[in-house]
Image: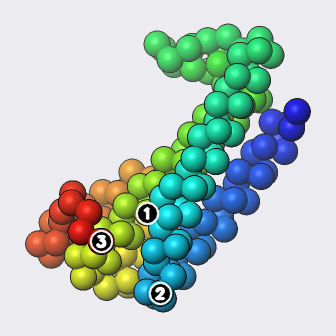
Amino acid sequence: MISAAGLFSLCNGLALVAWSAMAVALFVPSLRRTTWIGTGLVVPAFLAVAYIGALAAGLAGGATGGFDSIAAVRSLFANDHALTAGWIHYLAFDLFVGTWIARTGTVAGRSPLLILPCLVLTFLVGPAGLLLALVIGSSTGTLTLEDRS
């Protein structure tokens, strides 16, 4: 079994490669479809499997706690595997949201220079990047929840 630290490093490295590829694909249209399949489906699916494994290892390793109070969450995340699962959760969802931002933004005709700051913020502080993308989409009249790619 892989250690929590090893899984953490593996998933962080994979996410960093995926985010980098997504940033490059903004400026290279021929890479977009393949990149978005990777960043929107393949890598998040791998991260989901890693998440389930880490969570199972945490629970099997005696993690206690839950999600009904801050104290329960703190107790749960005192276990390294459960904490790693929580981090992988962020990696998977932020990457999925970043792919959505990139896809909907380019399909709507937004400049990659407007999309890139949204991706950087999503990578660093998830919901702030999503908010910026929504504000840009609303203010340019290009906000859509439809996938027209």
| Element under disc 2 | helix
- Return the disc, 2 or 3, that comes first in the chain's sequence: 2
Say which amino acid is labelled 2.
Ser
Say which amino acid is labelled 1.
Thr
Residue at 48% from the left image edge and 67% from the top image edge: 36
- Decide which of 119, 49 is in the foreground and name it: 49
Quarter of the rendering containing residue 106: bottom left
- Return the disc, 3 or 1, that comes first in the chain's sequence: 1
Quarter of the rendering containing residue 56: top right
Q: Is residue 118 left or right of residue 70?
A: left
Residue 41 placement (x, y as % from top left): 51, 55
Q: Which image quarter is the N terminus in? A: top right
The residue under label 3 is 149
Say which amino acid is labelled 3.
Ser
Residue at 60% from the left image edge and 66% from the top image edge: 18
CA distance separating discs 3 and 1: 12 Å
CA distance separating discs 2 and 3: 13 Å
Q: Is residue 63 left or right of residue 113?
A: right
CA distance separating discs 2 and 1: 16 Å
Q: Is residue 30 above or below residue 34?
A: below
Residue 38 placement (x, y as % from top left): 56, 63
> Do residues under tags 2 and 1 come within 8 Å of each other at their CB atoms?
no
- Decide which of 16, 68 is in the foreground and name it: 16
Residue 21 placement (x, y as % from top left): 58, 74
Q: Which image quarter is the C terminus in? A: bottom left
| Element under disc 1 | helix
Q: Is residue 149 left or right of residue 61?
A: left
